[in-house]
Image (tube, rainbow, N blue to C red):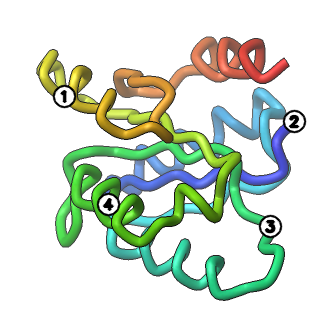
Amino acid sequence: MLEKIYCVDDDVITLMLCKKVIERASFAKEILTATNGEEAILFFKELAEQSNPAYPRLVLLDLNMPIMNGWEFLDQYLKNGYQNIFTEAKFIVLSSTIDPQDVEKTKNYPMVVDFLSKPITKEMIENLKLKQT
Protein backbone atom coordinates (compact mmCIF):
# COMPACT_ATOMS: atom_id res chain seq x y z
CA MET A 1 0.00 0.00 0.00
CA LEU A 2 1.28 3.43 -0.93
CA GLU A 3 1.32 6.23 1.63
CA LYS A 4 0.05 8.92 -0.77
CA ILE A 5 -1.37 9.20 -4.26
CA TYR A 6 -1.96 12.51 -5.98
CA CYS A 7 -4.80 12.78 -8.52
CA VAL A 8 -4.81 15.78 -10.86
CA ASP A 9 -7.97 16.24 -12.91
CA ASP A 10 -10.35 19.12 -13.58
CA ASP A 11 -13.43 16.90 -13.44
CA VAL A 12 -14.70 16.55 -9.87
CA ILE A 13 -16.60 13.36 -10.72
CA THR A 14 -13.39 11.78 -12.02
CA LEU A 15 -11.60 12.83 -8.82
CA MET A 16 -14.38 11.31 -6.69
CA LEU A 17 -14.25 8.11 -8.76
CA CYS A 18 -10.45 7.94 -8.40
CA LYS A 19 -10.71 8.33 -4.64
CA LYS A 20 -13.43 5.68 -4.33
CA VAL A 21 -11.67 3.14 -6.55
CA ILE A 22 -8.31 3.64 -4.82
CA GLU A 23 -9.93 3.39 -1.37
CA ARG A 24 -11.86 0.24 -2.28
CA ALA A 25 -8.71 -1.36 -3.63
CA SER A 26 -6.79 -0.38 -0.46
CA PHE A 27 -4.03 1.01 -2.68
CA ALA A 28 -3.14 4.14 -0.73
CA LYS A 29 -3.52 5.49 2.78
CA GLU A 30 -4.03 9.07 1.59
CA ILE A 31 -5.41 10.42 -1.68
CA LEU A 32 -4.66 14.05 -2.46
CA THR A 33 -6.26 15.94 -5.34
CA ALA A 34 -5.80 19.00 -7.55
CA THR A 35 -8.09 20.37 -10.23
CA ASN A 36 -5.44 21.65 -12.64
CA GLY A 37 -1.73 21.60 -13.37
CA GLU A 38 -1.12 24.97 -11.74
CA GLU A 39 -2.42 23.67 -8.39
CA ALA A 40 -0.23 20.61 -8.79
CA ILE A 41 2.91 22.67 -9.54
CA LEU A 42 2.25 24.80 -6.45
CA PHE A 43 1.83 21.61 -4.42
CA PHE A 44 5.22 20.29 -5.55
CA LYS A 45 6.81 23.72 -5.11
CA GLU A 46 5.69 23.78 -1.47
CA LEU A 47 6.95 20.24 -0.95
CA ALA A 48 10.31 21.12 -2.52
CA GLU A 49 10.76 23.88 0.05
CA GLN A 50 10.47 21.39 2.91
CA SER A 51 13.33 19.33 4.25
CA ASN A 52 12.65 15.63 3.74
CA PRO A 53 9.06 16.00 2.47
CA ALA A 54 6.58 13.12 2.48
CA TYR A 55 5.58 13.26 -1.17
CA PRO A 56 3.22 11.06 -3.21
CA ARG A 57 4.96 8.19 -4.96
CA LEU A 58 2.25 8.02 -7.60
CA VAL A 59 0.55 10.84 -9.51
CA LEU A 60 -2.46 10.22 -11.76
CA LEU A 61 -2.51 13.07 -14.25
CA ASP A 62 -5.16 14.21 -16.71
CA LEU A 63 -3.97 15.93 -19.89
CA ASN A 64 -6.91 18.14 -20.82
CA MET A 65 -7.44 20.70 -18.06
CA PRO A 66 -8.00 24.45 -17.90
CA ILE A 67 -5.48 26.94 -16.47
CA MET A 68 -2.53 24.54 -16.90
CA ASN A 69 -2.97 21.28 -18.78
CA GLY A 70 -1.09 18.05 -18.14
CA TRP A 71 1.58 18.73 -20.77
CA GLU A 72 2.29 22.18 -19.35
CA PHE A 73 2.46 20.68 -15.87
CA LEU A 74 4.95 18.02 -16.97
CA ASP A 75 7.09 20.65 -18.70
CA GLN A 76 7.10 22.83 -15.57
CA TYR A 77 7.84 19.83 -13.36
CA LEU A 78 10.95 19.09 -15.43
CA LYS A 79 11.94 22.75 -15.79
CA ASN A 80 11.82 23.19 -12.00
CA GLY A 81 13.96 20.07 -11.49
CA TYR A 82 11.36 18.33 -9.34
CA GLN A 83 12.23 14.97 -10.91
CA ASN A 84 15.60 15.32 -9.11
CA ILE A 85 13.96 16.08 -5.77
CA PHE A 86 11.06 13.63 -5.87
CA THR A 87 13.06 10.79 -7.37
CA GLU A 88 10.60 8.04 -6.48
CA ALA A 89 7.51 9.83 -7.82
CA LYS A 90 6.01 8.07 -10.81
CA PHE A 91 3.33 9.51 -13.06
CA ILE A 92 0.53 7.79 -14.89
CA VAL A 93 -1.36 9.77 -17.46
CA LEU A 94 -5.05 9.05 -16.99
CA SER A 95 -6.85 10.59 -19.94
CA SER A 96 -9.86 10.29 -22.18
CA THR A 97 -7.76 11.14 -25.24
CA ILE A 98 -7.48 8.48 -27.89
CA ASP A 99 -4.74 10.21 -29.86
CA PRO A 100 -1.80 7.79 -30.30
CA GLN A 101 0.52 10.81 -30.52
CA ASP A 102 -0.34 11.62 -26.89
CA VAL A 103 0.73 8.14 -25.82
CA GLU A 104 3.95 8.55 -27.79
CA LYS A 105 4.58 12.03 -26.37
CA THR A 106 4.53 10.72 -22.79
CA LYS A 107 7.77 8.89 -23.57
CA ASN A 108 9.51 12.29 -23.53
CA TYR A 109 8.89 12.51 -19.79
CA PRO A 110 11.05 10.09 -17.78
CA MET A 111 8.77 10.18 -14.73
CA VAL A 112 5.73 9.01 -16.75
CA VAL A 113 5.54 5.23 -16.50
CA ASP A 114 2.13 4.49 -18.05
CA PHE A 115 -0.80 5.87 -20.02
CA LEU A 116 -4.29 4.70 -19.05
CA SER A 117 -7.67 5.54 -20.51
CA LYS A 118 -10.47 6.91 -18.35
CA PRO A 119 -12.43 5.92 -16.46
CA ILE A 120 -10.23 4.37 -13.82
CA THR A 121 -11.40 0.96 -12.66
CA LYS A 122 -10.66 -1.35 -9.78
CA GLU A 123 -8.98 -3.72 -12.25
CA MET A 124 -6.58 -0.94 -13.29
CA ILE A 125 -5.71 -0.31 -9.65
CA GLU A 126 -5.26 -4.02 -9.02
CA ASN A 127 -2.83 -4.16 -11.97
CA LEU A 128 -0.95 -1.19 -10.54
CA LYS A 129 -0.76 -2.94 -7.18
CA LEU A 130 0.78 -5.97 -8.88
CA LYS A 131 3.40 -3.76 -10.57
CA GLN A 132 4.29 -2.20 -7.20
CA THR A 133 5.23 -5.55 -5.66
- Label 1 secondary element: helix
Q: Amino acid at mark 1?
A: Asp
Residue 1's label in the rendered image is: 2
Image side of residue 80 versus residue 53, left or right:
left
Mark closer to the chain start, 2 or 3: 2
Q: Separation of disc 2 and disc 4 at Cα?
A: 26 Å
Mark closer to the chain start, 3 or 4: 3
Residue wearing tag 3: 54
Residue wearing tag 1: 102
Q: Vertical placement of 63 versus 128: above or below?
A: below
Tell me the crowding category of disc 1: few under 14, some 14 to 19, or many 20 or more residues within 10 angstroms, Cα based.
Answer: some
- Label 3 secondary element: loop
Q: Amino acid at mark 4?
A: Phe
Q: Nearer the viewer, residue 91 or 12?
A: 91
Q: Separation of disc 4 and disc 1 at Cα?
A: 15 Å
Q: Nearer the viewer, residue 95 or 100?
A: 100
Residue in the image at 46% along x and 24% along y = 114
Residue 73's label in the rendered image is: 4
Q: Separation of disc 1 and disc 3 at Cα?
A: 30 Å
Question: On the rendered image, what quadrant is the C terminus found in?
Answer: top right
Residue in the image at 64% along x and 33% along y = 21
